[in-house]
């Protein structure tokens, strides 16, 4: 990982020390994500089409008539303002996804607030009788014991339960 970032010329002492001090693999992956070689994505296509400046405008959230501004980015490859906006949104989404603090915030929020719900798939009541306790289940994910989560996943895999 460090070699890959170094080959890109983007490795600095601060980043190197943060990677080496990471407590777990998730933290290392979050730090590496912005430097990881990317496949072609909707965001990379939007960048190639010149939509990064529009994405920066969206990210700044300044008082701007964004649909009018998007019209300035219409081209042969981006024929409408709506397509320009969608491409810019894709770039912003990628930036947010690659931001370690944003990812940490989402993980903490998910761990605190996530609800797991299960419903029986219509017409599967008799075949999935062993999952009857979960035919109409809802509960906080952080309060569900691991055996219950595994049972819910098995029920979904067997197409008896639908999880949300």
Image: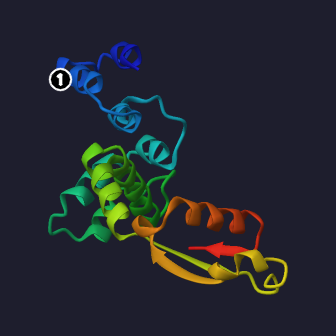
Foreground of the two, 12 or 28: 28
Label 1 CA crowd tier, 10 Å (few <14, some 14–19, many 20+):
few
Q: Quadrant of the C terminus?
A: bottom right
Which residue is drawn at the image coordinates 47% and 77% (left, top)?
139
In screen coordinates, is 37 left or right of 27? right
From this view, report whether residue 140 is shown above or below residue 44: below
In screen coordinates, is 7 left or right of 61? right
Foreground of the two, 75 or 19: 19
**Which residue reaches farthest left?**
63
From this view, report whether residue 156 is shown above or below residue 36: below
Residue 60: percent from the left, percent from the top?
A: 18, 57
Which residue is drawn at the image coordinates 48% and 55% (left, top)?
78
In screen coordinates, is 54 left or right of 153? left
Q: Quadrant of the N terminus?
A: top left
Q: Secondary structure at mark 1?
A: helix
Count of numbered marks: 1
Could you say which quadrant of the image residue 27 lies in? top left
Which residue is drawn at the image coordinates 76% and 86% (left, top)?
122
The residue tagged 1 is 14
Which residue is drawn at the image coordinates 30% and 16% (left, top)?
9
Residue 86: percent from the left, percent from the top?
A: 44, 61
From this view, report whether residue 1 is shown above or below residue 117: above
């Amino acid at each position: 990982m460090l070699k890959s970032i170094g080959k890109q010329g983007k490795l600095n002492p601060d980043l190197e020390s943060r990677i080496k001090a990471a407590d777990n693999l998730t933290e290392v992956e979050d730090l590496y994500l912005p430097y990881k070689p990317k496949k072609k994505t909707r965001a990379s296509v939007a960048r190639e089409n010149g939509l990064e400046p529009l994405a920066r405008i969206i990210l700044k959230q300044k008082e701007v008539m964004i649909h009018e501004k998007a019209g300035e980015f219409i081209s042969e490859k981006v024929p409408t303002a709506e397509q320009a906006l969608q491409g810019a949104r894709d770039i912003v989404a990628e930036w947010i996804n690659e931001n370690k603090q944003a990812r940490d915030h989402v993980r903490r929020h998910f761990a605190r607030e996530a609800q797991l719900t299960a419903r029986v798939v219509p017409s599967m009541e008799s075949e999935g009788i062993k999952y009857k306790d979960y035919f109409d289940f809802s509960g906080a994910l952080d309060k569900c014991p691991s055996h219950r989560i595994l049972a819910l996943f098995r029920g979904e895999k067997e197409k008896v339960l639908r999880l949300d």
